[in-house]
Amino acid sequence: MFWSYREEMRNNMQSALLQNVASGTYIAQLLIRNTHAVYKNIVFEGYTNHIALFSGGNIPASGILRVHPNDIIAIVI
């Protein structure tokens, strides 16, 4: 299990939490700034226009979660 906090990576690049995560990687939990939801059992699909894409799990509506990398607080892989 890998747990990473945004605060620990403050001096790194803007997408520090996802810089070593390959497309198709299973993510057990994703915490996003200013939301009350914890997204579980999702898959990192990659980037498009500097936006991280996730699918699967408990994502409502379209099934694709679009998140700016700076808004990701923590991930559990």
Image: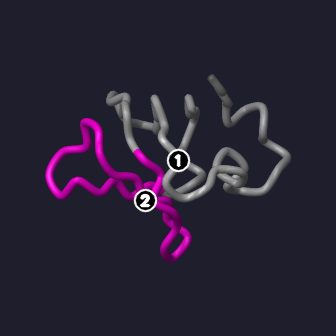
Q: Residue furthest bottom?
A: 49
Q: Which residue is located at x 34 percent, y 28 percent?
A: 36
Q: Nearer the viewer, residue 29 or 1?
A: 1
Q: How is the image coloured?
A: one colour
Toward which corner of the image does residue 64 lie, by quadrant? Answer: bottom left
x, y percent for residue 26? 48, 41
Question: In screen coordinates, is 18 left or right of 50?
Answer: right
Toward which corner of the image does residue 9 lie, by quadrant? Answer: top right
In the displayed structure, 33 sits above or below 53; it is above
Question: Which portion, as a residue range, is magenta?
Answer: 43-67
Dot 2: few (<14), some (14–19), or many (≥20) neighbours within 10 Å?
some
Which mark is nearer the camera, 1 or 2?
1
Q: Callout 2: helix, strand or loop?
A: strand
Q: Is residue 63 magenta?
A: yes
**What's the residue type where badge 1 is placed?**
Thr
x, y percent for residue 11? 85, 46
Q: Which residue is mark 2?
A: 53
Q: Nearer the viewer, residue 38 or 43?
A: 43
Q: Which residue is located at x 43 percent, y 59 percent?
A: 53
